[in-house]
Image (cartoon, rainbow, N blue to C red):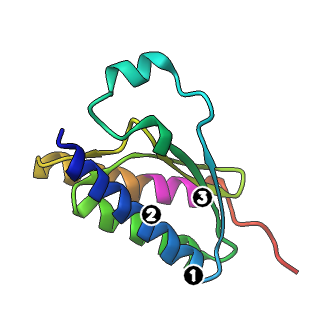
């Protein structure tokens, strides 16, 4: 994988995170202090370990949750993929060794469909917190 391309993808993800922050959604971002050496060796052609981040978004409304998923889907449509998850009121993005650029349109479509399915399941099983 071309380092220049992965760095551009990383910057695009960081822009999306900033845009999400800018609308007032709480975001926590932490660096990976001690990356797994096996992962570093196996995926050394991807994002530099010094740039690896764990990002958690805390949406308070369904509209905010949808905005996060729109950004995630837009990145997927661009072929920028990474691990995601949800639970306990937060939506997680793993910007680490899993960050990659995918060129295969079928794989991209599968990823987008999986993200939609996760969104539907997560909304059903992990409701937003009550805000008074």
Q: From the viewer's side, name the closer residue of 106 and 25.
A: 25
Q: From the viewer's side, name the closer residue of 77 and 42.
A: 42
Residue 53 locus on image (x, y percent): 53, 47
Secondary structure at numbered mark 1: helix
Q: Residue at x 39, y 54 (%)?
A: 115
Read off the magenta span: 118-124
**Residue 71 horizontal side relative to residue 111, left or right:** right
Q: Which residue is mark 2?
A: 14
Q: Which mark is residue 124?
A: 3
Secondary structure at numbered mark 3: helix
Residue 8 locus on image (x, y percent): 28, 58
CA–CA distance between discs 1 and 2?
12 Å
Q: Is residue 112 visible?
A: no
Q: Are marks 1 and 3 in contact (CB under 8 Å)?
A: no
Q: Which residue is mark 1?
A: 22
Q: Residue at x 60, y 27 (%)?
A: 34
């Amino acid at each position: 994988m071309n380092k220049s391309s992965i760095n551009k993808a990383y910057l695009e993800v960081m822009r999306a995170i900033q845009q999400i922050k800018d609308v007032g959604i709480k975001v926590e971002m932490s660096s990976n202090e001690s990356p797994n050496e096996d992962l570093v060796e196996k995926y050394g052609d991807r994002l530099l370990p010094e740039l690896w981040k764990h990002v958690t978004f805390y949406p308070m409304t369904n509209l905010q949750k949808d905005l996060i998923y729109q950004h995630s889907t837009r990145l997927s449509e661009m072929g920028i993929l990474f691990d995601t998850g949800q639970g306990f009121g937060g939506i997680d993005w793993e910007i680490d060794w899993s960050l990659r650029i995918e060129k295969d349109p079928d794989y991209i479509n599968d990823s987008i469909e999986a993200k939609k399915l996760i969104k539907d399941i997560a909304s059903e099983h992990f409701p937003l917190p009550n805000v008074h």
